[in-house]
Amino acid sequence: MISVNYFSQTEFYYNHRYLRREISLLLNRESNQFRAPHSVTHNFLSFFFAVNITWSSINFKTILQWQPVPTNYVYTVKISGINSNWEKACVHTKETECDVTDKLEKVKDTYTAHIVSEMLSGTEKFEEPPYAISPKFTPYNQTTIGKPGIQTYELTDSKLKVLVEDPLTPYRFPNKTFKSIREIFKNDLEYTLYYWKDLSTGKKEATTKSNQFEISIDKGENYCFYVQATILSRRENRKSQESNMNCTRHWEDGPAGTYLVKQVNRLVFSCCLLQIYKLFMKQ
């Protein structure tokens, strides 16, 4: 009795004529009706299909990954969307990952990848090589949103102003500049500012559909904060990664920014006085 349980380890599609032919050879060999060519049965048994296929995607930069590392064969990736034709990527590769970002620019389309296993030249070849099929992937709904940036922040009296920087995607405008997630998600993108008094655990939040926050705070207090994006239409994976945390600092002369400006002004003024004094002494 021949066991083929290893087929259930992955979901794959194959050519039925090829499968029937190979199983027939194995069955005939088992029953001693005739001797099947050793090279054919060996290739069939040692031929591995891709397993553990996953999509890894951040800000629409998308890598398709799988196992195992090939031995006497290579992989070719084919990708198609519901509204797009089949395209090849990473042809005849011995790697177990493939950057497919440029094949997924229609971000609202739903894609499927076939990872084709092909024998190396000089070994047994088949008209239609078998392949493993990936889970479906929709970039708009499934890519992870990376950390937003804090472009600037300002603390003045009882106001904290924060300007958020959108993460960039790998996709470009015709002028070659990169598109941000704002250009893709538009009104579906919302930012949340989480803020709290320094050394306090009482966290507050504010939301905006723009990139700017202006919130009222207690005068003279230091605050820490971070920002996170939300994709409103999503049911899962709605939140982005958290931005780096920032904290304001007050000095005796006022907020840290104002204090530093004053110190620079004092230094410049001192240098000017020194130059005037030197000129006066020369006379």
Image (tube, rainbow, N blue to C red):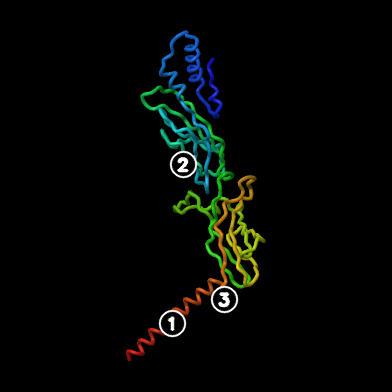
- Determine whether label 1 and label 3 are within 8 Å by CB: no
Q: Is residue 243 left or right of residue 97?
A: right
On residue 270, the disc is: 1
Taking depth in this image into account, of 198 and 136 the one nearest to the observer is: 198
| Quarter placement of the N terminus | top right
**What SS does tag 1 mark?**
helix
Taking depth in this image into account, of 120 and 35 the one nearest to the observer is: 35
**What SS does tag 2 mark?**
strand
Q: CA distance from mark 3 to mark 2?
A: 53 Å
What amino acid does circle 1 point to?
Answer: Ser
**Residue 168 point in image, percent of width and height:** 50, 53
Q: Is residue 85 left or right of residue 216?
A: left
Quarter of the image holding residue 244? bottom right
Quarter of the image holding residue 271? bottom left
The residue singled out by tag 2 in the image is: 99
What amino acid does circle 3 point to?
Answer: Glu
Q: Residue furthest bottom?
A: 283
| Quarter placement of the C terminus | bottom left
Q: Residues within 10 Å of mark 2 (few under 14, many from 20)?
A: some
**What SS does tag 3 mark?**
loop
Residue for point 57% across, 71% down: 250
Residue for point 39% across, 27% down: 120
Q: Residue furthest front?
A: 199
**Residue 272 point in image, percent of width and height:** 41, 82
On residue 252, the disc is: 3
53 lies above or below 234: above
Q: CA distance from mark 2 to mark 1?
A: 58 Å
Q: Earlier in the sequence, mark 1 or mark 3?
A: 3
Q: Residues within 10 Å of mark 3 (few under 14, many from 20)?
A: few
What amino acid does circle 2 point to?
Answer: Asp
Q: Is residue 237 left or right of residue 100?
A: right
Residue for point 41% across, 33% down: 92
